[in-house]
């Protein structure tokens, strides 16, 4: 959704105040939402209206399941047509659909209520991750995701932009209305845009007496919202520590850091919502929807602090990874989990890297965070699981869920090191070259199009040959553990024990950020190649993956297997200079599609 469109249309709507049927006429599809927070049970009353065209019946999709929560449908009650001559009937075989019968050319008007299994959003009870996706109804505020709130007519043409209207009323003057579509203040609010109805579903909506702060990043609005502080209910763990001002300041810094890193202006509007989950400590998570990120955190959250910085940066990075590099999956195949090593692992890699690059984290912060992650990786009961096993149980087995985060980050580190050892600028420059314009961002693509993982291999090939493909086969597809060496984290770190008897850990080299090689690796002052490139790999005892082929008795063709070998010193003449544009051309058009297909390993092609 483009906010400029919304603002332009909003201005037009305000010039000629529209009410009742006049408002209906301006909207192909309209939801009017009125919170009822002073009744029991609290609920949101929704009036849905749309033009039925020449049809005599229209199908409706009710909220069903989303992100592992499947009780959204149970909270929709009282669905009925306003016109006594129109009827709403259950659809055969599916609980989540209804059929409305009506006359051709009529405007269909329906009413329903949305409740919540959480009786009181202000009661300071511990909230699970599933609870954070459920509708929240407080005494003076609410939050609902589109997936829980909106009944959707399914006969609308999804290819043609519709005139969509999402309006709110029923709260006191001065109330906030904000979410994926923007932010407004008053007793009511109107959001208008042209697009598809599904955009309204992948969204979050809040209203009421919320804590809200607006910050500007390069002139663009970044809003932070938190629920109101309810002074009468103090959880046993004590009050939620962070205040709205410190959260809003850090949010703006973190948003700015990654826009600068990607050299991308970002969207005109961004919302970050933070809820206390009323746990004492430990549990953090976030959910990213269109232009908004909704997080929950425990009472001991510190802002700024490592966990807050990591969670927010990781979730905000999902605005770029994977969609701005996409597609990452084929339409209808539901195979994205096989490439979580990219969408989650590269996101973790860039989370650490953006925080370091922006100066928001020190080398010690970076090392500390990665040491904890690598310790969990080394001890993982699923360490050697192959990627088919990972993809199959990523939603049910926490150890499997964690693996792609570690594997992808280690692969990104490995490829960055290999590129820089050859005098290239590194992985950041390759990734920036692969980034799609915002309007072309997509997560799923047709079989005829190369996936981002194909395009990445094609972009790496001029400098690294087939090594990345073999790495992928070995470390991701087959699940061979990464060997962690002195060079794994780059020249700012060394692997050494704190004390002689201790397990070695990554430690920041003394005054690392004053050393040209480390500064260049971090990207301080812009992209720069490794000043020691050409012999860096041999100096640090790096490894590379080669295919070793042998003749096997009884087999016609040689049998090839990937093997990790010590890297040889590159000859002086073997240095490559960075050539961003030429290198990235391989990622576009037919050539990329061809090389993408070629790049697919014959077996276990699930990771690509
Ligand atoms: Zn993630």
Image (cartoon, helix red, strand yellow):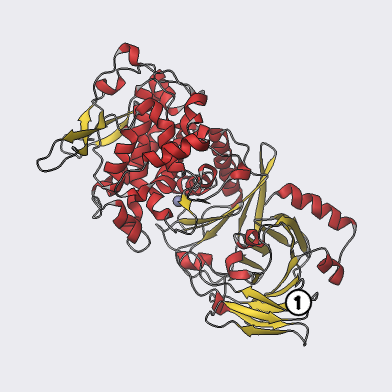
Q: Residue at x 42, y 48 (%)?
A: 344
In this view, the residue in front, 289 or 214, is 289
Relative to 94, is 535 on the left or the right? left
Q: Count of labels shown?
A: 1
Secondary structure state at the residue bearing disc 1: strand
Residue 329 placed where, x, y %?
A: 46, 51
Q: Is residue 48 above or below residue 529?
A: below
Q: Residue at x 75, y 59 (%)?
A: 191
Residue 492 seen in render: no
Residue 236 placed where, x, y %?
A: 45, 67
Residue 462 placed where, x, y %?
A: 40, 26
In this view, the residue in front, 183 or 78, is 78
Residue 81 seen in render: yes
**Most extreme residue toward the right, as rendered?**
16
**Most extreme residue toward the front, as rendered?**
556
**Most extreme residue toward the left, as rendered?**
553
Relative to 403, is 300 on the left or the right? right
Residue 91, by quadrant, is bottom right
Q: Is residue 421 above or below residue 342?
A: above
Q: Residue at x 47, y 67 (%)?
A: 130
Q: Residues within 10 Å of mark 1 (few under 14, many from 20)?
A: some
Residue 134 placed where, x, y %?
A: 54, 69
Relative to 249, is 568 on the left or the right? left
Q: Residue at x 60, y 77 (%)?
A: 115
**Most extreme residue toward the bottom, as rendered?**
84
In this view, the residue in front, 358 or 473, is 473
In this view, the residue in front, 284 or 422, is 422
Q: Which residue is mark 1?
A: 109
């Amino acid at each position: 959704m483009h906010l400029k469109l919304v603002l332009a249309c909003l201005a037009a709507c305000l010039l000629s105040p529209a009410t009742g049927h006049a408002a209906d006429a301006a909207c192909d599809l309209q939801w009017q939402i009125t919170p009822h927070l002073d009744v029991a049970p609290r609920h949101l009353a929704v009036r849905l209206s749309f033009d039925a065209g020449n049809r005599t019946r229209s199908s409706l999709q009710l909220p069903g399941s989303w992100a592992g929560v499947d009780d959204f449908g149970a909270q929709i009650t009282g669905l009925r047509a306003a016109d006594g001559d129109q009827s709403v009937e259950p659809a055969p075989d599916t609980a989540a659909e209804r059929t409305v019968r009506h006359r051709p050319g009529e405007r269909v008007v329906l009413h329903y209520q949305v409740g919540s299994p959480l009786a009181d959003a202000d009661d300071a009870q511990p909230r699970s991750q599933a609870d954070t996706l459920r509708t929240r109804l407080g005494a003076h505020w609410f939050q609902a995701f589109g997936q829980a709130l909106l009944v959707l007519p399914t006969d609308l043409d999804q290819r043609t932009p519709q005139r969509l209207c999402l309006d709110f009323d029923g709260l006191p003057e001065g109330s906030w209305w904000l979410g994926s579509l923007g932010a407004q203040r008053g007793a009511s609010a109107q959001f208008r845009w042209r697009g598809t109805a599904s955009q309204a579903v992948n969204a979050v909506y809040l209203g009421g007496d919320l804590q809200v702060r607006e910050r500007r990043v390069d002139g663009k609005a970044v809003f932070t919202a938190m629920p109101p502080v309810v002074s009468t209910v103090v959880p046993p763990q004590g009050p939620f520590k962070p205040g709205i001002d410190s959260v809003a300041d850090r949010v703006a810094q973190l948003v700015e850091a990654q826009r600068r890193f990607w050299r991308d202006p970002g969207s005109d509007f961004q919302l970050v919502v933070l809820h206390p989950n009323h746990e004492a400590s430990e549990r953090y998570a976030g959910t990213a929807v269109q232009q908004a990120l909704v997080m929950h955190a425990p009472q001991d959250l510190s802002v700024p602090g490592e966990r807050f910085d990591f969670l927010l940066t990781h979730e905000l990075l999902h605005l770029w990874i994977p969609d701005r590099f996409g597609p990452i999956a084929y339409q209808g195949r539901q195979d994205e989990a096989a490439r979580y090593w990219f969408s989650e692992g590269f996101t973790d890699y860039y989370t650490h890297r953006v925080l370091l690059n922006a100066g928001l984290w020190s080398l010690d912060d970076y090392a500390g965070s990665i040491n904890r992650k690598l310790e969990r990786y080394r001890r993982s009961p699923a360490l050697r699981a192959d990627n088919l096993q990972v993809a199959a149980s990523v939603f049910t087995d926490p150890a499997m869920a964690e693996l792609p985060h570690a594997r992808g980050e280690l692969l990104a580190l490995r490829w960055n090191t290999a590129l820089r050892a050859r005098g290239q600028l590194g992985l950041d420059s390759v990734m920036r070259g692969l980034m799609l314009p915002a309007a072309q961002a997509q997560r799923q693509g047709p079989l005829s199009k190369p996936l981002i993982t194909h395009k990445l291999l094609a972009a790496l090939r001029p400098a690294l040959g087939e090594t990345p493909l073999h790495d992928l086969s070995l470390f991701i597809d087959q699940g061979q553990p990464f060997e962690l060496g002195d060079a794994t984290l780059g020249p700012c770190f060394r692997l050494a024990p704190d004390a002689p008897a201790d397990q070695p850990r990554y430690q920041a080299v003394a005054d690392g950020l004053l050393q040209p090689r480390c500064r260049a690796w971090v990207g301080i002052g812009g992209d720069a190649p490794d000043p020691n490139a050409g012999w860096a790999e041999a100096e640090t005892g790096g490894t590379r993956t080669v295919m070793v082929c042998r003749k096997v008795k009884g087999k016609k063709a040689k049998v090839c297997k990937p093997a990790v070998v010590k890297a040889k010193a590159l000859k002086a003449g073997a240095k490559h200079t960075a050539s961003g544009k030429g290198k990235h051309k391989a990622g576009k058009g037919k050539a990329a599609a061809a090389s993408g297909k070629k790049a697919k390993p014959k077996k276990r092609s699930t990771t690509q």
